[in-house]
């Protein structure tokens, strides 16, 4: 599924990804494709996942984060998770994501 333009934006050298309300397999493919295209073509050094509106995330969401971490870390970049509610924060920490990304 193709993401709307306002959901992904490059600001300076940061790719900001506004995660959808539900992050599941259906949403994941579009986010991955759009993010990878911007990472490779727009001089992105860091990725910020904004979970402000997210209420549900399955393993597909974790896969999105891990995949972008692998791509961006090759260039010395970092990945951040912001505005995660308690549920999303528990999912991220429980999956060990705090060892590879910064959860703010």
Image: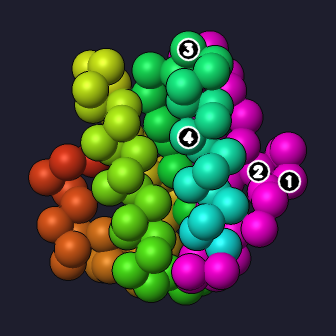
Residues at marks 1 and 2, CA–CA distance in whole angstroms: 6 Å
C-alpha separation, residue under disc 3 versus residue under disc 2: 18 Å
Q: Nearer the viewer, residue 66 or 91?
A: 66
Question: On the rendered image, what quadrant is the N terminus found in?
Answer: bottom right
**Residue under numbered circle 4:** 36
Q: Earlier in the sequence, mark 3 or mark 2?
A: 2
Q: Is residue 102 visible?
A: no
In contact (CB < 8 Å): disc 1 and disc 2:
yes
Q: Residue at x 31, y 69 (%)?
A: 92
Q: Which of 25 and 86 is in front in this view?
A: 25
Magenta region includes residue 12: yes
- 83 on left or right of 22: left
Give the residue number, with chain letter if any, for mark 2: 7
Q: In whole angstroms, how far apart are the C-alphas of marks 4 and 3?
A: 11 Å
Q: In this view, does 36 lie to the left or right of 65?
A: right
Q: Indicate which disc, 2 or 4, sits on the residue closer to the N terminus.
A: 2
Residue at the spot 46% in from the left edge and 71% down from the top edge: 61
Q: Quadrant of residue 96?
A: bottom left
Residues shaded magenta: 1-26
Q: Is residue 101 above or below residue 27?
A: above
Which mark is first along the chain, 3 or 4? 4
Q: Nearer the viewer, mark 2 or mark 4?
A: 4
Please tell me whether mark 1 sits on a helix, a strand or a loop: loop
Residue 24 percent across, percent down from the top left = 57, 81
Q: Residue 43 carries which label?
A: 3
* Badge 4 or badge 1: first in the primary sequence: 1
Q: Mark 1 points at which residue?
A: 4
Question: Mark 3–mark 2 contact, CB under 8 Å?
Answer: no
């Amino acid at each position: 599924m193709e993401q709307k333009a306002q959901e992904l934006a490059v600001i300076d050298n940061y790719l900001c990804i506004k995660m959808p309300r539900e992050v599941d397999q259906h949403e994941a493919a579009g986010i991955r494709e759009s993010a990878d295209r911007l990472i490779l073509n727009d001089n992105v050094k860091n990725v910020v996942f904004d979970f402000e509106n997210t209420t549900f995330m399955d393993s597909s969401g974790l896969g999105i984060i891990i995949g972008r971490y692998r791509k961006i870390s090759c260039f010395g970049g970092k990945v951040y998770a912001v505005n995660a509610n308690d549920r999303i924060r528990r999912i991220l920490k429980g999956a060990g994501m705090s060892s590879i990304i910064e959860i703010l």
